[in-house]
Image: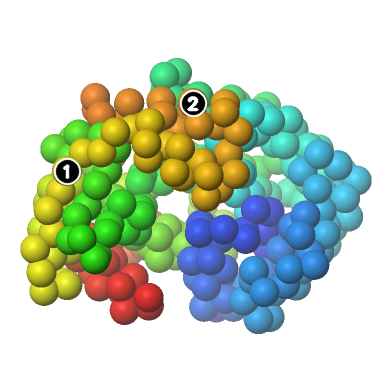
Amino acid sequence: MTDIMVALIGGGGVTGRPVIRAFQKRGVRVRALTSRADRPSAFPDHVEIRSANLLDVDSLAAGVESADTIHYIPPSFDPREEEYARNVIAAAERAGIPRIVYHSVLHAPTPDMPHHFRKSQVELLLRHSRLEWTVLQPAMYSQTALAFLDRDVGELTPAFDPTRPFTPIHDGDLGEAAAIVHTSGRHGFATYELAGTECLDFAAMGERLGALLGCTIATRKVPADVLARRLAAARRYTDEQVRELRLMFDHYDSYGLVGNGNVLRMILGREPTDFTGAMRESLAAR
């Protein structure tokens, strides 16, 4: 257990929730910086909430002041990500916060996925800063499979070839790894690829989901444009964000997204949670 304060930037979404749970389990106090401080229900109890804007260095510096370290989760598919990162770095340096952990992505320097490639440029900004940085590069979350699941129909419908390989990471394992990095002094200036230890395609994920649900889950590819537009409507994406989402689907359709589980195993000090375990936990929570 520890008693440090982490300033969490961008923690109001699906990535932030397991990170906050892992922080609190290890006794880490969490201060969430958000542009929607009027919506405290987005965060669990006992999280301090402060208003800040990624385009405003002054508000960021005031928000992180007196924290021990920063955990930065950037917005998804946002073309201003490098600008945001410059502001976060400037705010940390201005407030005298020595450490930052940046939530990047597996295989960041991939030019045909612009939202990945921007993260590689943010990693460069961190390396050129005066901060002690750690970069986390997670693979696709195990829980992402549930976004493609229609339980009523009994189908898993990704917008890419369901035979392409992935090494999914349980979001709870990612949160635990982040908490360990923040509460240990051994992870400065490290870049960690965080993947699960199983290499699975979506057909195999569908079979495992079916076994848990007690039914047959068929897997088929749906048109990428259709799914991209549906997600865009739900998330209010711009046309450019839709284009980048489609480019990600195209990349997955050709290559999947695979990494190695050894680093995650090393950080956790145990075997990472397998896909079935992650789904059992997530389905029970729902």
Residue type at mark 2 is Arg
- Residue at 77% over, 43% down: 54
- Residue at 12% over, 53% down: 218
Q: Quadrant of the C terminus?
A: bottom left
Residue 101 left/right relative to 271 = right
User: Which is more toward the observer, 227 or 28?
Assistant: 227
Q: Callout 2 environment at 10 Å: few (<14), some (14 to 19), or many (20+)?
A: some
How many marks the image carries: the answer is 2
Q: Quadrant of the N terminus?
A: bottom right
| Mark nearer the N terminus (2 vs 1) | 1
Looking at the picture, how far across and down is residue 132, in whole percent? 65, 43
Q: Where is 189 relative to 45, above or below?
A: above
Q: CA distance from mark 2 to mark 1?
A: 22 Å
Judging by the rendered image, the residue that carries numbered circle 1 is 220
In this orientation, does residue 147 appear?
yes
Judging by the rendered image, the residue that carries numbered circle 2 is 243
Looking at the picture, how far across and down is residue 182, in whole percent? 57, 59
Helix, strand or loop under label 2: helix
Residue 130 left/right relative to 271 = right
- Residue at 41% over, 25% down: 247
Residue 231 left/right relative to 80 = left
Q: Where is 157 relative to 17, above or below?
A: above
Q: Where is 78 relative to 175, above or below?
A: above
Residue type at mark 1 is Arg
